[in-house]
Image: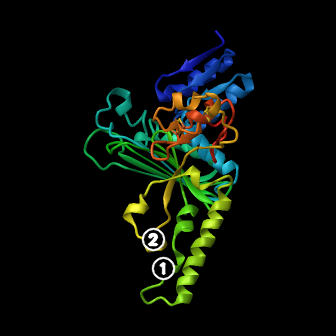
């Protein structure tokens, strides 16, 4: 036997890891590593000195959209990262039994079961933490555990981060990064990436000459329009590789908003989706790999033999991007290894 997997009570992890290390065994230990900093240091030191691997079961960082948020940060597309947020919560607090309902094994409510994943996610996104404050609260009369825990972190980079976790509320599962170049969310258990900014295509089509009205002077109207266009250009620069065809707008502004309202509403929300470089695609030669595998029937061949992507149907899952043998897809913010 070369190693062991530790899935016992949280409070037993440190001793088992130390005994395994002294026997020269590698360890995969379920999260949380331990319940105290002292125990964590003891387990890590024993493993390091014995020359064995100690791995903790934090799998959430490998979820696709979370890795794409990390890619956006590392590439500089989100600019300077000011804030990180993460929340993992669920309804199962009162129904927990046995040691899972024991505050000695599960301090800070859902931290050991849920929140610890998000602490790991923020550490993955921003690196070492400099200082931490945390608050726990027992609100309901059900069960023995705290209901809600909030953590504020300052990272060595200066970025601030927040982790929230609770039992007894509907499911929440997201990790977000907010930077000077844009905001990005990993949502729906890391399946969906969302980015926020001003969609340059929306500003492009606005009839700037038709915006005058009300009490604004022409100079004021012009200044507002100029500001928005500059913001759109900045956003375009920030999302390197971004083109309007990669933006799926989540507000049907064509139907629900006037052109004037484009200049008074908050920035448009959009999701990134792939686009096809027609010159690299060989659909005309019969390739149907992407359209055959798309789970949402978002790809189809036009009468002229071109592969066409339907923005309305595409969810940005990325399956077509990694499958295309010609590398004919562009998907800003997502490299092939990330997909
Ligand atoms: S898999 Fe690539 S080359 Fe084949 S049809 Fe789709 S985009 Fe074109
Ligand atoms: S990203 Fe997913 S949904 Fe969109 S076209 Fe490709 S396979 Fe279909």
The residue drawn where x is 48% and y is 79% is 210
The residue indicated by pointer 2 is 259
Q: Is residue 34 above or below residue 216?
A: above
Can residue 80 be seen from the camera position used here? no
Residue 255: horizontal and vertical position, in percent? 38, 61
The residue drawn where x is 48% and y is 29% is 10
Residue 17: horizontal and vertical position, in percent? 60, 23
- The residue nearer to you, when weighing 283 against 34, is 283
Q: Is mark 1 on a helix, strand or loop?
A: helix
Q: How many marks?
A: 2
Mark 2 nearby-residue class (10 Å; few <14, some 14–19, many ≥20): some
The quadrant of the rendering that contains the C terminus is top right
Mark 1 nearby-residue class (10 Å; few <14, some 14–19, many ≥20): some
Q: In this view, does 276 lie to the left or right of 8?
A: right
The residue drawn where x is 33% and y is 44% is 170
The answer to whether the residue bearing label 2 lies less than 8 angstroms from the nearest atom of ligand 2 is no
Q: What element carries label 2?
A: loop
The quadrant of the rendering that contains the N terminus is top right
Q: Quadrant of ligand 1?
A: top right
Residue 265: horizontal and vertical position, in percent? 45, 69
Answer whether labels 1 and 2 touch (C-beta < 8 Å): yes
- The residue nearer to you, when weighing 62 against 207, is 207
Q: In this view, does 305 lie above or below 233?
A: above
Residue 76: horizontal and vertical position, in percent? 69, 54
The residue indicated by pointer 1 is 211
Can residue 184 be seen from the camera position used here? yes
Cα distance in 3D space between marks 1 and 2: 8 Å
């Amino acid at each position: 036997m070369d190693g062991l997997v530790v899935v016992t009570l949280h409070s037993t992890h440190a001793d088992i890891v130390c005994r395994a290390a002294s026997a020269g065994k590698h360890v995969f230990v379920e999260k949380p590593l331990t319940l105290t900093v002292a125990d964590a240091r003891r387990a890590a030191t024993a493993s390091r000195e014995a020359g064995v691997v100690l791995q903790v079961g934090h799998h959430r960082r490998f979820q696709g959209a979370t890795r794409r948020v990390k890619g956006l940060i590392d590439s500089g597309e989100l600019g300077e990262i000011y804030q990180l947020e993460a929340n993992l919560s669920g309804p199962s607090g009162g129904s927990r039994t046995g040691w899972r309902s024991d505050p000695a094994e599960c301090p800070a409510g859902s931290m050991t079961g849920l929140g610890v994943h998000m602490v790991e996610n923020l550490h993955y996104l921003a690196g070492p933490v400099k200082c931490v404050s945390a608050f726990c609260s027992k609100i309901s009369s059900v069960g023995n555990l705290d209901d809600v825990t909030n953590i504020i972190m300052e990272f060595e980079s200066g970025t601030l981060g927040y982790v929230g976790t609770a039992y007894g509320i509907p499911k929440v599962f997201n990790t977000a990064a907010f930077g000077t170049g844009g905001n990005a969310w990993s949502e729906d258990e890391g399946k969906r990436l969302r980015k926020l900014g001003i969609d340059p295509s929306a500003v492009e089509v606005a009839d700037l000459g038709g915006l005058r009205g009300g009490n604004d002077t022409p100079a004021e109207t012009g200044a507002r329009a100029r500001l928005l266009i500059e913001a759109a250009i900045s956003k375009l620069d920030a999302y390197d590789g971004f083109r309007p065809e990669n933006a799926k707008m989540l507000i049907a502004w064509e139907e629900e908003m006037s052109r004037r309202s484009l200049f008074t509403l908050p920035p448009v929300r959009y999701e990134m989706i792939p686009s096809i470089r027609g010159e690299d695609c060989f659909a005309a030669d019969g390739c149907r790999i992407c359209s055959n595998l798309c789970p949402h029937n978002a790809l189809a061949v036009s009468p002229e033999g071109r592969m066409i992507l339907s923005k309305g149907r595409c969810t940005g899952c990325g399956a077509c991007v990694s499958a295309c043998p010609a590398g004919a897809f562009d998907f800003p913010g997502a490299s092939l290894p990330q997909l």
